[in-house]
Amino acid sequence: MSQAVEESNRRLLRARDAMDREFAQPLDVARLARIAHVAEAHFIRTFKGTFGETPHRYLQRRRVERAMFMLRETDSSVTEICFDVGFASLGTFSRTFSAIVGETPSAYRRRGRPIEAPTCFAMAWTRRAVLEKRGATTAISFVVTHVLPRRRPHNMLSSINIHGVFVLDQDEALDFYVGKLGFEVANDYDLGFMRWLTIRVPGEEGREILLEKPGPPAMDDASAAQVREILTKGATGYAVGVTTGDCRKTYDELLAKGVEFTQEPIERFYGTDCGLRDPFGNHIRIVQPATGPIVFDAAEFAAS
């Protein structure tokens, strides 16, 4: 994959992230095309070619995802939720919701319960490709059947000491992860065949993130091109999760530094979290854990 395609994917991802952040606001094609630095017709065509659906359909689905959250976890009426998520017509909202989820907003609310999963996973698993595999009329369900107690059994493995993240430019990665997010460099060695660059949370020895550039000798050029394409489309999944003592304060500070967020802080059963991307497309979550034990009803509920 050429550098031009990588840059195009990243610009399109910024436009898609804008829809994730500002789904309730009027977002026309002209504004989104400006974010991606392309003409309107080219934006629609390349967006669909890259992400598999038109910008309009993606925005509708993003609004429906937010509506699902509000139906589960607030007491707002269906009409209030309709307008809060950006729809101008209750009829359009109900038809779109039914087409995507497989049931009406009211039926979903009656059946629903809070999703016991981080927001990023809830969003990812209600994406179009996942729903199509389930079938157009399948209602969405997230069920926690049981939770294992936390314990440290005696076994061969004692801890996680390193985790790898692909980046396209290691110097740019340092500017972001160290200069903006506040990580510190743990190791930076020229091994000849590769640059071994790891970072860590300041003072947290023994757990590091390897910022790895895809390519030889770990993989051939064709495989590296596939990795870069997936990365710049924002399709690598959940890359890094970190904790903070004050999620909203951290959000404000990073926003002021120009960090691109995909989701503002939201209260969840496990705490308060927000989502952002690094300059290459990796998805990062920042969580302020809830105080005390996390307690929720894990009993299964009847399938729709």
Image: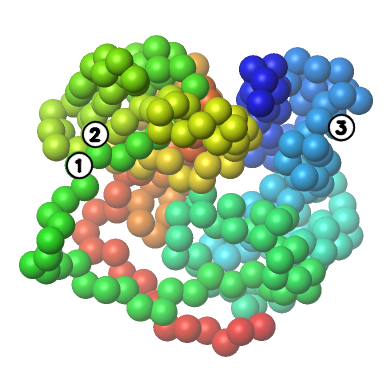
Task: Tell me: residue 5, above or below residue 294.
Answer: above
- Quick one: quadrant of the N terminus? top right
Kindly identify the amino acid type of the residue bearing the numbered disc 2. Glu
Residue annotated with mark 2: 208
Q: Secondary structure at mark 2?
A: strand
Between the residue at mark 2 and the residue at mark 1, the CA separation in whole angstroms equals 6 Å
- Disc 3 from disc 1: Cα separation: 43 Å
Q: Is residue 31 visible?
A: no
Residue 258 visible in the picture: yes
Question: At x 15% / y 33%, what residue is drawn?
Answer: 204
For this view, does 300 lie left or right of residue 250?
right
Regarding mark 1 in the picture, which secondary structure is present there? loop
Image quarter of residue 262: top right
Q: Which three-letter amino acid code belongs to the residue tagged 3?
A: Arg
Q: Nearer the viewer, residue 162 or 147?
A: 162
Q: Which residue is mark 3?
A: 45
Task: Tell me the residue that label 1 is attached to.
Answer: 161
Q: How many discs appear? A: 3
Question: Where does the image place residue 122, in percent across and percent down from the top left?
Answer: 55, 57
Position of 29 relative to 104 (above/below):
above
Q: Earlier in the sequence, mark 2 or mark 1?
A: 1
> Which of the two labelled residues, at mark 3 and mark 1, occupies the earlier sequence position?
3
Q: Residue at x 59, y 72 (%)?
A: 141
Residue occupying the point 35% across, 56% down = 270
In the rendered image of this protein, does residue 188 appear above or below residue 18? above
The answer to which of 4 and 13 lies nearer the viewer is 4
